[in-house]
Every structure is written in structure tokens, then in C-alpha cells.
């Protein structure tokens, strides 16, 4: 580990910035993969209060109309 730190310390500032940006990119990339494996259904039932006002077909028509705008 110390060899890596020594090598990084010998780099010019611009190269260290590039290295930092690349490390951040990799961190975000691999964290996304971990999160994408577990899909949450926490949205289920959020529209249940609308079932007395609209049928599922009516909701589908409303969604299509919103997409067309």
C-alpha cells in the first residue's frame, strides 16, 4: 500500500486530480452495481387511495395523455 501512496505523491497535481476523479468514477460504478441487484417495491400501494376515483383503464388513459404533452 505504501508503494501506491509514494507513487501517487510523486505525481504532479493535475495527474493526482485525474487519478482522484477516476477513483470516484470507479467507486460510483461499483456502488451502483451493488444497489441495482436489490430492487425495492416501496412504491407499491402508493396510488391505492385513487382506486375509488379511477379504474385502472382510466389511469392508463391519463398517463398516456400526460406522456403526449
Image: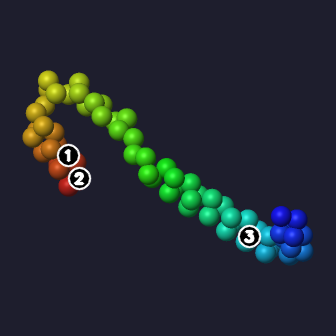
Residue in front for this viewpoint, 22 or 54? 22
Q: Nearer the viewer, mark 1 or mark 3?
A: 3
The local crowd at label 2, few if under 14, some if 14 to 19, many if 20 or more residues have their Cα within 10 Å, is few
State the mark number for residue 43. Answer: none
Question: Residue sitting at 20 percent across and 46 percent down?
Answer: 63
**N-term mark: 3 or 2:** 3
Question: Residue sitting at 16 percent across and 27 percent down?
Answer: 51
Q: Nearer the viewer, mark 3 or mark 2?
A: 3
Residue 33 locus on image (x, y percent): 50, 57
* Residue 10, image quadrant: bottom right
Question: Residue sitting at 23 percent across and 27 percent down?
Answer: 48
* Residue 4, image quadrant: bottom right
State the mark number for residue 67. Answer: 2
Residue at the disc numbered 3: 19
Q: Is residue 18 above or below residue 53?
A: below
Give the total of numbered labels: 3
Does the CB distance between marks 1 and 3 fall below 8 Å?
Answer: no
Query: What is the secondary structure assignment of the residue under circle 3?
Result: helix
Residue in front for this viewpoint, 50 or 68? 50
Q: Is residue 55 above or below residue 67?
A: above
Q: Is residue 14 left or right of residue 33?
A: right
Residue 60 locus on image (x, y percent): 15, 44
Residue at the disc numbered 1: 63
Amino acid at each position: 500500500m505504501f508503494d501506491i501512496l509514494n507513487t501517487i505523491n510523486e505525481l504532479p497535481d493535475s495527474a493526482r486530480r485525474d487519478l482522484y476523479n477516476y477513483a470516484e468514477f470507479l467507486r460510483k460504478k461499483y456502488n451502483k452495481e451493488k444497489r441495482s441487484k436489490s430492487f425495492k417495491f416501496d412504491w407499491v400501494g402508493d396510488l391505492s387511495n385513487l382506486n375509488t376515483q379511477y379504474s385502472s383503464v382510466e389511469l392508463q388513459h391519463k398517463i398516456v395523455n400526460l406522456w403526449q404533452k
